[in-house]
Image (spheres, rainbow, N blue to C red):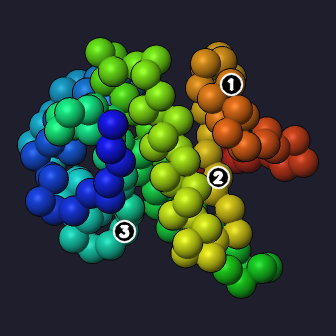
Amino acid sequence: MSIQKATILELESLTELFDLYRVFYEQTSDPDRAREFLRERLTNGESVVFMAFEEGNPVGFVQLYPSFSSVSMVRSWVLNDLYVKESARKKGFGEELLKGAITFGRETGAKGILLETGKDNVNAQKLYEKIGFVRESNYFYHFTI
C-alpha cells in the first residue's frame, strides 16, 4: 500500500477513479468531463489530491479544496471527496488516505479539515471519528444556489 500526492501525470488513472466515485453517487458516467474537471483543478492548484495504490495499481483517492478562516486568518481544507474501489475496501486504504490528508493539513499550517457526510453514511462516520474527526454540533450549515 502506498499513498502519494497526485500530479497531472496521474490524470488518467485519477480520472477513472473519479468517474467511479461519481457513479457511486448516482451520477452518469462522463470520463471526458471528469478528466477536464480534474485537469483544471490540478493545473490551477485549486485542489490537492492524494491517491492510494495497491501493488502499483490506483485504488482510491481523497481530494481537498483550500479554504480560509477570516477570523483566525489561516488556511483550512475542505475534504470533499474520498473514494476507494470496491475491490480494495476494508483493507485500510480509506484510513490511510485520510491520515495522509491530515498530515498534509498539519504540514500546511491549516486550522483544520472540514468534511460532510450523509446522515445515513454510518460506515464513513465511524471511520472519520476513529481517526480523530469530531462531529460538529455548534453550527448549522445552509446551502443555496
Distance in Å between CA atoms under marks 2 and 3: 16 Å
Task: Tell me: residue 89, above or below residue 51.
Answer: above
Q: Earlier in the sequence, mark 1 or mark 2?
A: 2
Which residue is under mark 2? Answer: 114
Residue at 32% across, 72% down: 45
Asked which secondary structure carries label 2, the reply is strand
**Residue furthest toward the right?**
138
Task: Tell me: residue 40, above or below residue 54.
Answer: below
Residue 89: percent from left, percent from top: 40, 19
Which residue is under mark 3? Answer: 46
Which quarter of the picture shows residue 121?
A: top right
Q: Amino acid at mark 3?
A: Glu
Which residue is under mark 1? Answer: 126
Q: Amino acid at mark 1?
A: Lys
Residue 132: percent from left, percent from top: 73, 43
**Residue furthest toward the bottom?**
73
Which quarter of the picture shows residue 48?
A: bottom left
Q: Amino acid at mark 2?
A: Leu
Q: Earlier in the sequence, mark 2 or mark 3?
A: 3
Distance in Å between CA atoms under marks 3 and 1: 29 Å
The crowd level at tag 1 (other Cα within 10 Å; few <14, some 14-19, many 20+) is few
Residue at 72% across, 34% down: 129
* Visible residue check, residue 36: no
Residue 133: percent from left, percent from top: 72, 43
Lateral position of residue 57 relative to residue 142, left or right: left
Q: Earlier in the sequence, mark 3 or mark 1?
A: 3
Residue at 20% across, 33% down: 55
| 81 vs 145, nearest the viewer | 81
Asked which secondary structure carries label 3, the reply is loop
Q: Are marks 2 and 3 in contact (CB under 8 Å)?
A: no
Q: Quadrant of the N terminus?
A: top left
